[in-house]
Amino acid sequence: MHQIVVGAALALDGIRQHRDWLFEAQRDIELQDFFTAEVLNGDWRPHAAEIRAALDGHGGRLGIHGPFWGFSTASRDPDIRALVARRMEQGLDVCAALGATQMVIHSPYTTWDHRNMDMPPQPYRGMITHFAHDTLGAAVRRAEAEGVTLVMENIEDMIPADRRALVDSFGSDAIRLSVDTGHAHFAHVTHGAPAVDYFIADAGAQLHHVHLQDVDGYADRHWSVGQGTICWDAVFRAIAACGPQVRAVLELRDKALIPASMRFITERGLAR
């Protein structure tokens, strides 16, 4: 199995703070400056130019976290679906401006869905797939044309195979899977979902992105790796087995704890 090189999810100030660490191993970066409506509806291009300047000489892979606040990617409301489709287009505009090749989007599945997915007379599972295609179809087609991969992150997901089947249903290499370790562990501890490494193993070759963050299972902590109760040996083994296409990035609430996370990871020989 290949050796994992850990990257980070950061805004511009975090890139400046951790520049030496990012550049010395050409680590993957996920930009987190462009997901709010206020930014996307405004003039974000000067900020993008600042980021391009800060990344001059960086040879790692670049992605962004796409918009997600306040909506579902499979809303029942057609007006909301149209708005979300526009937000996806705005995110892809950012990718085009920055040369980013990956955009994180959110899964539509909720814990309510898990209990009601196959409720008669009309299974809700098919409705989610239909609404997701209506919402994301144009973005997937544009991503195909522009060399961007949308990666769908688990949020409240209980059954990883459901999200995998939804991604598969698009029949496109431009939409793949993301696993957030903290979200998966929260679902495992609080609701009885599979363990984090099971989420990752289920994704297999479809896995293209991982958010690395630690939690205790009570809330979405985004703690430094090693501060919570996730079994990291199993997680990193599962990531390595999925292949070198996976971008594994630290997504910590306190960016100053990136060195502490890396000490935990490297001392155990899990990644570099």
Image (cartoon, grey):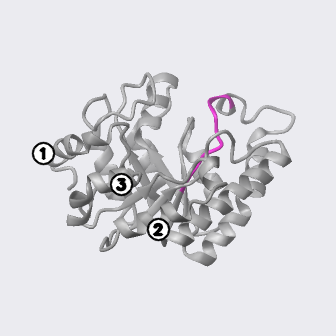
Disc 1 residue type (three-letter): Glu
Mark toward the start of the polypeptide (1 vs 3)? 3
Q: Give me the C-alpha separation between circle 2 and circle 3.
A: 25 Å
Q: Residue at x 42, y 63 (%)?
A: 51
Q: Give me the C-alpha separation between circle 1 and circle 3.
A: 17 Å
Tell which of 172 and 32 is nearer to you: 32
Q: Residue at x 69, y 48 (%)?
A: 73
Whether residue 151 is visible to the viewer of this picture, yes or no, is yes
**Would you place residue 144 above or below residue 79 in this image?**
below
**Would you place residue 189 above or below residue 102 in this image?**
above
Q: Give me the C-alpha separation between circle 1 and circle 2.
A: 37 Å
**Residue at image mark 2:** 49
**Residue at image mark 1:** 267
Residue 160: x and y in percent read 54, 44
Question: What crowding class fits label 3: few (fewer than 14 Cα within 10 Å), some (14-19), or many (20 or more)?
Answer: many
Tell which of 149 and 58 is nearer to you: 58
> CB under 8 Å between callouts 2 and 3?
no
Tell which of 14 and 45 is nearer to you: 45
Disc 3 residue type (three-letter): Ala
Question: What crowding class fits label 2: few (fewer than 14 Cα within 10 Å), some (14-19), or many (20 or more)?
Answer: few
**Residue at image mark 3:** 248
Mark toward the start of the polypeptide (2 vs 3)? 2
Q: Which residues are magenta?
A: 104-112
Residue 217: x and y in percent read 41, 25
Disc 2 residue type (three-letter): Ala
Question: What crowding class fits label 1: few (fewer than 14 Cα within 10 Å), some (14-19), or many (20 or more)?
Answer: few
**Mark 1 or 2, closer to the camera:** 2
